Image (cartoon, coloured by chain):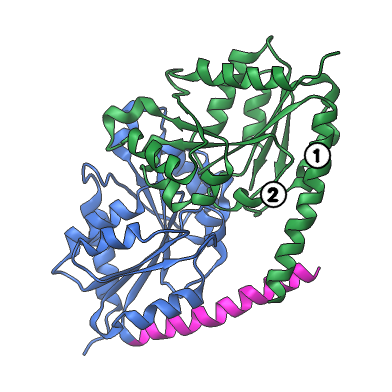
Chain colours: A blue, B green
Amino acid sequence: MSVVTIERKVLEKNDEVALRNRTLFTDHGVYVINMVSSPGAGKTTILEKTIDLLKGKTRLAVIEGDVQTDIDARRIERSGIPAVQIVTRGGCHLEANLVHEALQSIKLAELDLLVIENVGNLVCPANYDLGENVKVVVASTTEGDDKPLKYPAMFRNAAVLLINKIDLVPYINARPDVLRKNAFSINPHLVVFETSALTNQGMDAWAQWLLDQATKTKPAR
Amino acid sequence: MSVVTIERKVLEKNDEVALRNRTLFTDHGVYVINMVSSPGAGKTTILEKTIDLLKGKTRLAVIEGDVQTDIDARRIERSGIPAVQIVTRGGCHLEANLVHEALQSIKLAELDLLVIENVGNLVCPANYDLGENVKVVVASTTEGDDKPLKYPAMFRNAAVLLINKIDLVPYINARPDVLRKNAFSINPHLVVFETSALTNQGMDAWAQWLLDQATKTKPAR
């Protein structure tokens, strides 16, 4: 029972810090997404392509979360936008306080959009609020169509689903329509985009949606 | 600090039960693998094909671990071998005591080989011994070649690496040689097989290796 109590305290403490993050984001009019997926679903590549599409149209920065290495932050920095790497050293998800620390290195006043790329994990990040506006879950067609049923918390807590690697459908036993149906059975409110970060299919629609959210969030000056 | 202490207690307790499982397996001469990977890397499909190749040559059973649903156990049962489903209800990995409970439904005396398919997760299952002989990590070519560097604990604690979906290499930016090099930089002792559960490439070699281990483990009667 003591473990359960501490786990609840950890989540309560996390929610407090998440609220502080959210207040900071709102005060600065910054729209924030928390990107989650299995390892290798394509979050970082999607992000690189999204940056290409949005550069000059909105001011964005990225916080990268990984168990180990700063490979992803270095990839993002090559896109020419600010990137901060959080290394969890074994931790299977980001927590609000890690994001809060990372914010020390980010100038919120100069941003419209902040993307937090979480640790690649379909379980742990589901229940940790970071202060974001929405969670965006990326599911690759190569992972099979049953993932929303097997990892329901993640799909329930997300607002957007990107069905990525849609270009591979002809080569594999993928059924994106079944994936979509399974996702809607868990969360009928999901906004869904089919994307390929390799061929750019669907990337314009996704980037435009993101830009619209960031624009709506910006307070009138 | 109290959380850390409890975490250590949880792991110590887990190790005690894992040792009991291991004693049971050894006493019955059953070879046990703990299959780990990202969600959707192909563990269950590999398992279905492996069962097809080994049926009649060895007596095997499967324990399936999932956050939710018994989809995988039902898939395995269709192969005509015993399957037990553990549902962790949000837990991001199997623990030794869950496996111990599942063993109540499995006749070890009638087995040579037991496959435990863990929750799809490249982080949490790394540090939980279930009593297995070896951990087998499955990495799909579609996940990119940097996963051993980003999730080192899993690759360090595994004895075997299956590079799966090798048939997709022509269609994606995959570099299985780089994946292999990165994996060896973390763990030079890995036994590596390149497989496709779809085209059956490499499946014979992998199944034969597994059969050899199970045969070696069986005590003379």
Question: What's the residue type where badge 1 is placed?
Answer: Asn
Q: Can residue A61 be seen here?
A: yes
Q: Position of residue A149 (x, y in %)?
A: 56, 44
Q: Quadrant of residue A166?
A: top left
Q: Is residue B183 above or below residue B4?
A: above
Q: Which residue does the image show at 77% across and 63% down from the upper left?
A: B9
Point out the stretch of residues depicted in magenta. Answer: A1-27
Q: Which residue is mark 1?
A: B21
On whether residue A22 falls in the magenta region, the answer is yes
Q: Residue furthest front?
A: B188
Q: Position of residue A97 (x, y in %)?
A: 50, 77
At numbered mark 1, what does the secondary structure look like: helix, strand or loop? helix
Q: Which residue does the image show at 24% across and 64% down from the upper left?
A: A77
Q: Which residue is mark 2?
A: B88
Q: Quadrant of residue A1?
A: bottom right
Asked if marks 2 and 1 touch (Cβ < 8 Å), the reply is: no
At numbered mark 2, what does the secondary structure look like: helix, strand or loop? loop
Question: What's the residue type where badge 2 is placed?
Answer: Thr
